Amino acid sequence: MFTSFIEALQAEGIDMAWQDFAHCRGADPDLFFPERGASTRAAKTICRECSVQDECLEFAIVSSEKFGIWGALSERERRKIRKERQIAARARKAS
Ligand code: SF4
């Protein structure tokens, strides 16, 4: 069992320099990986005060993170951004 969200990320072998500045350092990882239907408010509140929110969100989007709150967005919210980017990329390619 991990004692922090960052510890959980490090255990995955994920090297992210920006994590040194993560506001969730020491936070309960369960806040960032809530059960289905549980509130994400506490995690998102922590994220919104984080100086590396953009980096974290971008990492989660490009690595297609399927679970958890990253950069103050849920998986569903990140999936919407990925889809919008795919549509924009296809439009650029077609023009
Ligand atoms: S944006 Fe949120 S999940 Fe990402 S590093 Fe900051 S506090 Fe942690």
Image: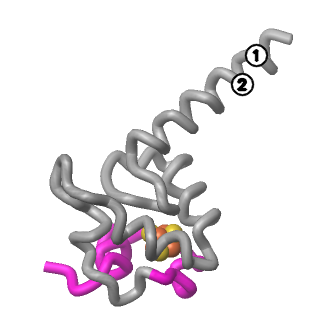
- Indicate the amino acid at tag 2: Ala
Q: Residue at x 22, y 60 (%)?
A: 34
- Indicate the amino acid at tag 1: Ala
Q: Residues within 10 Å of mark 1 (few under 14, many from 20)?
A: few
Q: Is mark 1 within 8 Å of ligand 1?
A: no
Q: Residue at x 20, y 55 (%)?
A: 38
Q: Position of residue 73 (x, y in %)?
A: 46, 54
Q: Would residue 90 be found to the left or right of residue 36 on screen?
A: right
Q: Residue furthest left?
A: 1
Q: Which mark is residue 12?
A: none
Q: Are marks 2 and 1 in contact (CB under 8 Å)?
A: yes
Magenta highlight on residue 66: no
Q: Nearer the viewer, residue 31 or 86?
A: 31
Q: Nearer the viewer, residue 73 or 89?
A: 73
Q: Is mark 2 within 8 Å of ligand 1?
A: no
Which corner quadrant holds the C terminus? Answer: top right
Magenta region: which residues?
1-23
Q: Would residue 66 be found to the left or right of residue 28 on screen?
A: right
- In the image, residue 84 above or below residue 50: above
Q: Would residue 62 be found to the left or right of residue 27 on screen?
A: right
Q: Residues within 10 Å of mark 2 (few under 14, many from 20)?
A: few
Q: Residue at x 34, y 46 (%)?
A: 66
Give the quarter of the image for residue 84.
top right
Q: Position of residue 55 (x, y in %)?
A: 62, 65
Which corner quadrant holds the N terminus? Answer: bottom left
Q: Which residue is mark 1?
A: 91
Magenta highlight on residue 19: yes
Q: Which residue is mark 2?
A: 88
Residue at disc 1, secondary structure: helix
- In the image, residue 59 above or below residue 1: above
Residue at disc 2, secondary structure: helix
